[in-house]
Amino acid sequence: MKITLSLFLSLIFTSCLYRPTVTVKEDFSDDWAMLRKYQKENDSIGPPKKGEKRVVFLGSSIFEIWKQKDPEYFRNRAYVDRGISGQISPQLLIRFRQDVIDLKPKAVIILAGSNDLAGNRGHVSNETILSNIKSMAELAKLNQIKVILCKYLPIYEYPWNKSLKGTAEQIISLNKEIVSYAESENFTILDYFTPLVDERNGQKAEYTTDGVHPNLAGYKVMEGITDAAIMKAIGK
């Protein structure tokens, strides 16, 4: 088959014009705290309406799964869930301005520490966790946001890290320090530990899916005591 000069030049020209579309995936490696997760939602939520007593729930998977298990609990109240599964306390601290302060809530509920302990390779202590909690609480106070600190849910062991020993004791120890700090600063204490604990200092089987995360029944228990703590902190 003979190719004329004009056909040859046409083929060359066409090949020069054709450029395959290459999708460049945005690099989020610098967003260690996953600020992007709630950024658009925060932009659309707007400031609190007149008389609205907004409360932000800041934590990890316990809070994120809560709104999936029982979305009505958040839909019918001025409660804003800002949980991100797997996050540790320094990530919550980085998110605090965007996901709490900028939303101008009346109160913030801070549930932190378990993931720090779950991945402990010797670099995590009660002191490091409490330092991050204190920083968040101090930021809240500076911005006239009432602070509600949580006693963490009981955990006997982490199913994904069973080699970690003494988990129940670590949770109890951390809770004692959180309560001591909260009392010294006159913060409201939200006790998720006592109503869910069993004889091993783990979660009661009827309230959990895996010994760490509550099932719907567990969340129903948490809802009652959460509402009571919020009322104590900011009233109706």
Image: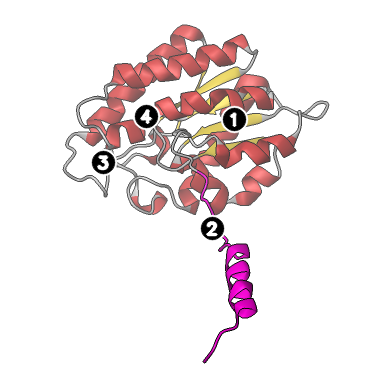
Q: Which residue is mark 3?
A: 156
Q: CA distance from mark 2 to mark 4?
A: 42 Å
Between label 1 and label 3, give the one nearer the viewer: 1
Q: Which mark is residue 99?
A: 1
Examine the structure image and report whether residue 21 is included in the region drawn in magenta.
yes
Amino acid marked by disc 3:
Tyr
User: Residue 194, image x and y in percent?
Assistant: 39, 33
- Identify whether 128 is placed above or below 27: above
Q: Are marks 4 and 3 in contact (CB under 8 Å)?
A: no
163 displayed left or right of 195: left
Specify which label sits upstream in the sequence, 2 or 3: 2
Q: Secondary structure at mark 4?
A: loop
Helix, strand or loop for disc 1: helix
**Which comes sooner in the sequence, label 2 or label 1?**
2
Q: Viewer-nearest of labels 1 and 4?
A: 1
Q: Secondary structure at mark 2?
A: loop
Q: Amino acid at mark 1?
A: Asp
The residue under label 4 is 113
> Which percent across, then down, holds residue 83?
51, 39
Query: Distance from label 2 to label 3 (Cα)?
Result: 49 Å
Q: Disc 2 versus disc 1: distance between alpha carbons?
A: 34 Å
> Magenta residues?
1-26
In the rendered image, which quarter is residue 131 located in?
top left
Find disc 2 in the rendering and name its residue.
Answer: 22
Are dots 2 and 1 in contact, CB under 8 Å? Answer: no
